[in-house]
Amino acid sequence: MEYTAYTSLMRYTAGKARRRKPLSRAVILRTALAIADAEGREGLTVRRLAQALGVTPMAIYRHCRNKDAIERGLVDLVVGDYDVTNHDERNWRDWLCTTCGLMRRGLIEHPAIISLLSKATYAGSDAMTVLERILHELRGAGFTPRGAAGMFHALMAYTIGSVTLGDSNAPRTLRREFTRAPRARYPQVVEAATTLADHFEGRCFEAGVRAIVDGLAEAGAATRS
Amino acid sequence: MEYTAYTSLMRYTAGKARRRKPLSRAVILRTALAIADAEGREGLTVRRLAQALGVTPMAIYRHCRNKDAIERGLVDLVVGDYDVTNHDERNWRDWLCTTCGLMRRGLIEHPAIISLLSKATYAGSDAMTVLERILHELRGAGFTPRGAAGMFHALMAYTIGSVTLGDSNAPRTLRREFTRAPRARYPQVVEAATTLADHFEGRCFEAGVRAIVDGLAEAGAATRS
DNA sequence: ACCTGAACACCGTTCAAGT
DNA sequence: ACCTGAACACCGTTCAAGT
């Protein structure tokens, strides 16, 4: 216990003076993200955060209204860090595919974020900029506003759901559960066990995105001009 | 504070004798679900649960290993309550559509569950039965094991992601954020505002499912026999 | 076997006080 | 203006004790 707290403190404050001058909202959020990444969402605690910052818990309240505000700030921080639309795929299908892949990557590298997504807000955040950029790309590809909105939402939902299903269980646990299920009661599960596990582990993510893109592109004559 | 605790106690124990005899794992989980539904995930507390059961917190530990076990139990409980595959659609597309609709319904009626999904396990749970049943239906429709697994995973991911995006923000908040976004910076968002909000509010869920089903059914010659 | 009481090591947050 | 100390009302969980 003592040891864990100590090494964590070392890790999060590495290279900084133990007594810093500023303590801004920005450094609070960055430290909070580091803690959440390392110990998970419930490992992030105002008191723990203060300790990592070398400060008293109450010092944090001078810069952030409360813990909820910090958690909301983390979502913004990650969205801002991953410039998911900043790449140079030429055709719009590849562009969408890469964008979703980058989103997925960001969510996986910061696993605590996905459970905070429900606290996020669009107004005045980087998320709105990402949304605008994706709609712009889709309009350029010939989608109507309605078609573009549908595509954005479906891909977003699929990506988030994919990550949720993926980090549900420890890496190889799920694979074992499927392959070792009693064949008499679960014949289909056993037969599809390895391919099921592949999907849950995210190995077929890109194929899923492409199928959804194609499915939505065809659906309804009104979605594309 | 006193008042809230009192009315909650009344609500959760309504119709039961204040001093019950058994206190089984089953009644603990049912009460826990009621609390989680009413106050959200962080409103569910061992001490609060004990209070609602008219018992000391430690009495609960005789029946459940710890809070984590209770939370995992809640996912099973909801999956078991909603018999999502029990309906009589004739063709497989409609069948999938209705199944996803029922899953979505269950998740929305118990909003705390979605954030507990990552704690769930397949082995020995009702979730495995649902999975088996869906794969069975897809095999019957001519899908290969691989194709069926892909379809299950994609629909599951989409459904979960859809609900996650939906309950992110309070009902009308998101709609306002989109329609009132500054037009100069976010022209596409403003233009698609109402249709975007419709999607986030889940009004186009069924259309999304159908498009994904069609997209995956076409994808790859190997997925169907 | 089943439940309770007291205790421990934590939480988020407020309020008054220091510099 | 920015930070601290002490306090309050909570947590999950363990351990020994009651019946």
Image (cartoon, coloured by chain):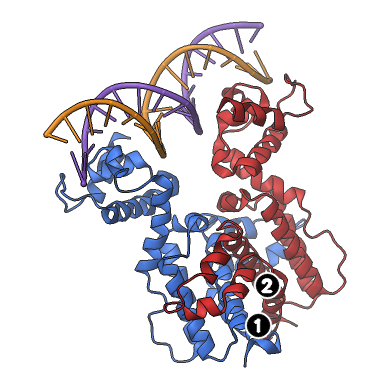
Chain colours: A blue, B red, C orange, D purple
- Residue B50 can be seen in this image: yes
In the image, what residue occupies the spot 70% across and 51% down?
B109
In the image, what residue occupies the spot 70% across and 60% down?
B104
Question: Are the residues flagged by discs 1 and 2 from a single subunit?
Answer: no
* Left or right of A79 on screen, residue B95: right
* Left or right of B140 on screen, residue B178: left
* Left or right of A109 on screen, residue A180: right
In the image, what residue occupies the spot 53% across and 85% down?
A138
Q: Secondary structure at mark 1?
A: helix
* Residue denoted by label 1: A215
Residue B45's spot in the image, x, y percent?
56, 34
- In this view of the protein, which residue sits in the foreground, A130 or B23? A130
* Mark 2 belongs to chain: B
**Residue B157, numbered circle:** none
Residue B110's spot in the image, x, y percent?
67, 49
* Residue denoted by label 2: B151
Marks 1 and 2: which is nearer the front?
Answer: 1
Q: How far, Cα to Cα, is label 1 from label 2?
A: 13 Å
Quarter of the image with the C terminus of chain A is bottom right
Quarter of the image with the N terminus of chain A is top left
* Residue B70 to residue B116: above or below: above
Q: How many marks?
A: 2
Q: Secondary structure at mark 2?
A: helix
- In this view of the protein, which residue sits in the foreground, B17 or A93? B17
* Residue B117 to residue A211: above or below: above
